[in-house]
């Protein structure tokens, strides 16, 4: 009986801690999108489907700096709350000294609450901290309305401590939406809070 009560309490707390951004999507973004594009159903309104984060190991992989690669993986796990999947080379490229099967990068796919929490930190803390930031270029959107951002230094995220600044690395963030065309994707992310240049 006591265990059941504890489980119910945990579920209630989980519902309370619904992402601020997800709540904003339901309360503000959906009505605004329906008004602008005239969707008949709520289900037709585009949403953010997933966030994919990619990091290439670069020279570290060639020189086989395992300690540095492990540090990158740890920092990625700190940023996202999820363990990264290591990606291996599909074929050998002699010009880059890459052999087939060599670990060349790491990738994380975020969905649900973790995705919204990451986006919230990205747009409210990380992007404003990046050097010479004047907003995201609308050209960063593809034809389907998904956004691709390149970040030069992972140190702009608040989770990164001073000790981690020895090995600064860049990462690529893809915000994938269910939008069918570019204008929909831009409007969706603008209403969500992404600082997009006009």
Image (tube, rainbow, N blue to C red):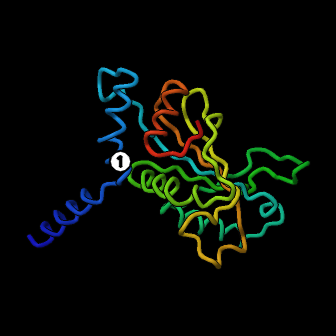
Residue drawn where x is 48% and y is 58% of the image: 121
- Considering only vertical position in the picture, is 84 above or below 24? below
Q: Position of residue 136 (x, y in %)?
A: 61, 43
**Quarter of the figure with the C terminus:** top right
**Left or right: 161 as drawn, with respect to 31:** right
**Left or right: 43 as drawn, with respect to 104:** left
Residue 175's image quarter?
top right
- Considering only vertical position in the picture, is 88 above or below 1? above
State the residue position of label 1: 22
Residue drawn where x is 39% and y is 49% of the image: 112
Front-most of residues 101 and 33: 33
Residue drawn where x is 54% and y is 63% of the image: 79
**Left or right: 192 as drawn, with respect to 75:** left
Query: How many numbered marks appear?
Result: 1
- Considering only vertical position in the picture, is 158 above or below 170? below
Q: Element type at marker 1?
A: helix
Q: Position of residue 52 (x, y in %)?
A: 56, 47
Q: Position of residue 135 (x, y in %)?
A: 60, 46
């Amino acid at each position: 009986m006591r265990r059941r009560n504890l489980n119910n309490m945990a579920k209630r707390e989980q519902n309370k801690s619904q992402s601020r951004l997800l709540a904003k999507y339901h309360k503000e973004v959906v009505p605004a999108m329906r008004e602008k594009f005239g969707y008949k159903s709520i289900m037709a309104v585009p949403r953010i489907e997933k966030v994919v984060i990619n990091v290439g190991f670069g020279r570290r992989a060639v020189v086989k700096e395992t300690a540095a690669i492990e540090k990158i993986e740890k920092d990625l796990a700190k940023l996202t709350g999820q363990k990264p999947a290591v990606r291996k080379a599909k074929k050998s490229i002699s010009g880059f000294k890459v052999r087939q099967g060599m670990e060349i990068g790491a990738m994380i796919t975020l969905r649900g609450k973790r995705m919204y929490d990451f986006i919230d930190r990205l747009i409210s803390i990380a992007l404003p901290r990046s050097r010479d930031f004047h907003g995201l270029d609308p050209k960063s959107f593809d034809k389907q309305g998904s956004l691709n951002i390149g970040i030069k230094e992972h140190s702009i995220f608040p989770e990164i401590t001073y000790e981690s600044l020895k090995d600064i690395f860049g990462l690529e963030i893809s915000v994938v939406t269910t939008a069918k065309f570019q204008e929909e994707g831009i409007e969706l992310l603008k209403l969500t809070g992404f600082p997009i240049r006009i």
